[in-house]
Amino acid sequence: MKRASGVGHLAPFLPGLESLLEDPGVSEIMINGPANVWVEREGRLEPHEAPGLTAAWLHRAAIHIARPLGLDPAARPVLDARLEDGSRVAICTPPAAPEVAITIRRFGGRAFSAEDLVRMNSLPEEALHAARATLAARRNVLVSGGTGSGKTTLLNALIELLPEDERIVAIEDTLELRIDRANCLRFEAGATLSETPVEIRDLVRHALRHRPDHIVVGEVRGGEAADLLQALNTGHGGSLTTIHANNARSALSRLASCAMQAGDALPWEVTCRGVVDGIALVLHVTRRDGRRFVEEALDVRGYDTAAGRWLTEPAWTTQTPKEVNA
């Protein structure tokens, strides 16, 4: 896949944002339109004055980002790009939006180990012990959370818990994970030499032909969940993935719902049993008051078909058991 230029190369096209683009403390820059800029710094949002950032400049910036990808914002008003430094950019232009909107998520300056996250109070030791034991038993972990909650950071840390002498196949929309392993094969969706892009589901199926010991999917969003569950239930234990969800229990339902989007989906009850067989532990991360941390850890025990609910036990949680199982 071609790459757009790095964050620093955007400065000439985004007047008034030069200092933000150079500031490693800024994790996200959100441009809602001309002179309407918001910044995330240390987990908190704040406005940024940029009176010189006009609609014309935003249009030029969108073209500058899209051109290396062989795209034209006028023909494709919604696009996602990964910059050369690993940062991600989402662009929406008219007629899909009243004004050009650009959101830049900076690629993190460093990868954090699980022990780093424990020291930062982002990962409770009890949750780390649960994840380590689950992966050592060749069972699978699902990381859930909202946008910007730290799912990728946690996923990256958990990958380090996998045995060094075993093979990992990692699949992502854009290559964000930092995997320092010699025997790791990485796939990226979206690459294409024709009109049909390679989808995550294609890569999950293809990964099985490359003899993985562990499969890592950066994020599950759709029908690829069905193929992933099949892989998790057929000899690829100790695998990892993430999903958007409001809490740990709803993450299981979201995973089942995604699997149901597959054209060859199995009945709901059968899919839920597949989730129970495929996922042993759910770690839910959240962002609150400028902090990102693991809020829940649930052991998955089963699915009550008659009641239509997941049977879980808290492996660790900041909430009371009554709240978790409500």
Image: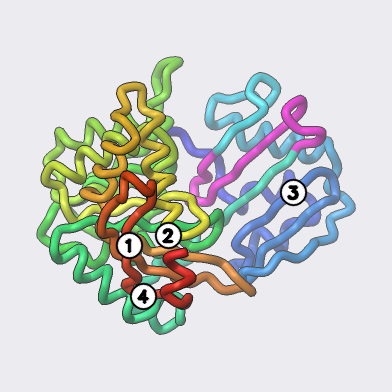
Q: Earlier in the sequence, mark 2 or mark 3?
A: 3
C-alpha separation, residue under disc 2 versus residue under disc 4: 11 Å
Task: Please say if the residues under marks 4 and 3 sit with CB atoms less than 8 Å apart.
Answer: no
Q: Which mark is residue 248?
A: 2
Position of residue 52 measured from the top left corner of the image (x, y, whole percent)? 87, 50
Q: Is residue 254 left or right of residue 288?
A: left
Identify the image quadrant of residue 182: bottom left
C-alpha separation, residue under disc 4 versus residue under disc 3: 38 Å
Q: Main secondary structure of the magenta part?
A: loop
The three-letter amino acid code for the residue at tag 3 is Ile
Range of magenta residues: 81-100
Foreground: disc 4 or disc 1: 1
Give the residue pinned by disc 1: 312
The three-letter amino acid code for the residue at tag 1 is Thr
Q: Is residue 306 above or below residue 130?
A: above
Q: Residue furthest top?
A: 195
The three-letter amino acid code for the residue at tag 2 is Ala
